[in-house]
Amino acid sequence: MSARACFHCALPVDSRDRFQVEIDGELKSVCCPGCKAVAELIRDTGMSDYYTIRDAPQPGTGRPADDATEWRVFDSDDMLCAFADTSGDGAEATIYVGGMYCAACSWLIETTLAKTAGIQTAEVSPVTHRLRVSWYPEITGLGGILASLANLGYKPQPLAPESSARPEVAEQRTALKRLLVASLGMMQVMMFAVGLYAGDFQGMDAETQRFLRIVSLIVTTPVVFYSARPFFAGAWRGIVSRMPGMDLPVAIAIAAAFLGSTYTTIISGPAVWFDSVVMFVFFLTLGRFLEMRARHRSIDRSTALSTLLPNTVTRIDGDRQTTVAASQLLVDDLVLVKPGESMPADGILVEGTTMVDEALLTGEAEPCPKSAGDDVVAGSINLDGSIRIRVEKTGSDTTLGTITRMSERARYARPAFVQLSDRIASYIVIAILFIAAAVATYWYINAPDRAFIITLSVLVVTCPCALALATPAAFAAAGSRLSELHLLVTNGNAIEVMSKATRVLFDKTGTLTRGAPVIVSTRVFDDAFDATQCRNIAAALETVSTHPVANAFTVSGNEVIANEQRIEPGEGVAGTIAGYRWRLGRHAYVTGGVSNAAEGDGYTSVYLGTDGRAVARFDIHDEIRTDAASTLSTLRSMGLSLALVSGDNKQAVQQVAGELQVSDFHFGCTPEDKLGIIRSAQKAGETVVMVGDGINDAPVLAGADVSIAPVHGALLAQTSADVILVGDALQPLQLGILLSRQTMRVVRQNLSWAIVYNAIALPMAALGFVPPWAAAIGMSASSLIVVLNSLRLSRFGAP
Amino acid sequence: MNIIYVLIPLALLLLGGAVWAFFWAVGNGQFDDLDTPAVRVILDDDKKPPEKPGS
């Protein structure tokens, strides 16, 4: 990590120390006025302890939003009805808090809100990132609460009351109850077991022994029937689906030991194993609980949907327009969608014509025209016209909802590697059942009184939990650590492939550079136009483009309007202005011929032309990201070969490549060229990681073994990239690759440990050297070792 | 040793009471946040902001 990191958000600070904040008597450098404001706010409200107690932030966390959202909209009574429950004394609402990452965040939010006038209670759940707040609406508005969250650098999003019940909370509550019953039951039964063992040594009258056994039975019963229920359910599912998992031998062992002990209690037989049963159930339940917590932490699933849909919509009731929550829309509502807004629901366009950006859904970068009668889908962006739509589907029924569910399922779907180890585990389970049967038969013939207890030990000791946990535990820990490092893994196989990577290809614009280009010079070749005119024409053409270069052209109050715009991916845009067909893009595209134009020194040159001749040239410069050089040199020191592929001209690419010391660079690449470069590297046996925003090269991302896209890229990239890089820093890349390598190391360690353990424990148990209680400890310990070894990954790279 | 016939059932009753109390607390959402309470005690809620120079 760079020594010059922003005190608040950990992004690199420029060398001039333009922004500084005094905290606890020390002058700290911050990167921008936004961070300065947040840090001063935190200091002035007496909360500067936040900085000492929080986990190390990942670069870019907690930066205030660039665009000041108008929160006052939420102060209206309409909004209060939409988002708050006003049935009680005051109002109560649930707010999703984006950007939270550790326990100190929830402390900061709760304490800050508690000091705000009019707020009764504020509770933040770090599991679901939800704030539950109740307040007096007469004193402060919902907008005020949202604004104070935004001032702290979080991204609040009010949620409709219905959606506040989260499945994670219910799951955690049930798991806690099961764990508590198992642990209390274990403590009690162990206590009685000590009495029973003592009785075995120093004698105990039959009646007391019987009493202690009955009491143990009473306490064990809820442990078996309540705490261990998930294992029986899992075993049954395994039988039904003919894929017996590790739950099956667990369930058989628990059931056999419990029924056997109950039987000996009734007939006053020689021994009971209630202590083994409760211990076994307790350790397994504890393991499941830890696994569940890791899973809940890994990724907040609600973000994808909620950030794409608008918070509020304008509903048309007759001749009145009311602002309501998007979640309150009903089928057949009439909604007004202004230019720049996204569709709140699936519906039919009833009035107006517009261009709609559906890149998110169709992968088609080009906006498509819509007029009355056409379907529109939720999440697509209305580009130019003001339209009215009639709602047909809302919420999770929409196309977007379906896609989100599908990508959620993909995220939860187990990667091929894990599936393989699952399948192996199920063969092992069948093998164990056969071995147990063979052991039982052997001992039944030779020593019938020991047959049951030895078979039980075999079943318990060989439980392939460690084997089954070896891979998923490591992947779950790695996944949650990666998301803390601002890399969201959308494809489960990405971690494994990333660990094998030998070559990393970088796109230039928006990846190695900031993606916020500026025009440094304009040269006009035609005397009929001046520079301002050319810029306005270019700006009008670029309105439809999502390419980062388009940002450079934005002109406020532009009166020139272009029609029939077309985007040629990798080439440029065309459009009709005042009857003339204009083109903006590479020289060859604009002139329709060979490119022989002089390029600007180290700049990206974009040409504007009509009738096949260039009218003006814009030289555009895009600053290199501050941590690009250090990240690339670290990647190189990790043994990766780096290359730069870009559609830009030679000078611009050469300059960036020179600054970053990348000797292998390709310029003027079309998406096909880039794909060709990837293919030839793959043919040479290399595993290729492509880092790019995928704006006009989605197939390039798909062609690489692993694709990583910075989140600032077009939405298209988010849907096709395997890994999404959140935030402005590139540095997570190197940690991500190191982490993926470490993950595969941990998986191998786990697997070898599980195999060695079973290879030693099984013969010992089959020979009758292991009593059931020792088997339970051995099995639990081997699983715990695997889990703990995997959990090392969740602290990877932390200081 | 006959006292155990009274004490152990009594212990089981207490155990049942403890489980009930815990279930009630979980149902009330008191255990929904397992991370923040651990750090809350070591934080001062009323740290004085520094004097602003020139204001």
Image (spheres, coloured by chain):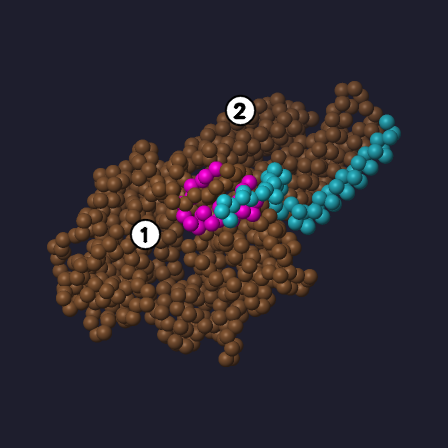
Label 1: how many Cα within 10 Å (few below 14, some 14–19, many 20+): many
Q: Does A30 appear in magenta?
A: yes
Of residue B31 and residue A112, the one placed in the foreground of this image is A112
Q: Residue furthest right?
A: B2
Is there any visible trace of residue A709 in the rendered image?
yes
Q: Does A530 appear above or below A267?
A: below
Q: Quadrant of the N terminus of chain A?
A: top left
Picture residue at 25% right of the left edge, 47% below the top: A645
| Chain in cyan on the image | B
Q: Could you say whether the residue bearing mark 2 is in a helix, strand or loop?
A: helix
Q: Chain of mark 2?
A: A
Residue A628, above or below A374: above
Residue extending furthest toward the front:
B54
Locate residue A549, reporting x and y percent: 28, 56
At horizontal 39% and vertical 61% (from top left) the residue drawn is A361
Q: Which residues are drawn in magenta?
A: A26-50
How far apart marks 2 and 1 lie (CA) works out to: 58 Å
User: Which residue position is annotated with label 1?
Assistant: A515
Q: Position of residue A204 (x, y in %)?
A: 81, 24
Determine whether A748 is above or below A167 in the image: above
Q: Mark 2 or mark 1: name the one nearer the start of the chain.
A: 1
Residue behind mark 2: A760
The answer to whether residue A263 is left or right of residue A172 is right
User: Element type at marker 1?
Assistant: loop
Residue type (three-letter) at the residue carrying disc 1: Gly
As drawn, A679 above or below A79 = above
Horizontal side, residue A764 vs residue A194: left or right: left
Q: Dot 1 falls on which chain?
A: A
| A594 sits to left or right of A379 | left
Chain A visual colour = brown
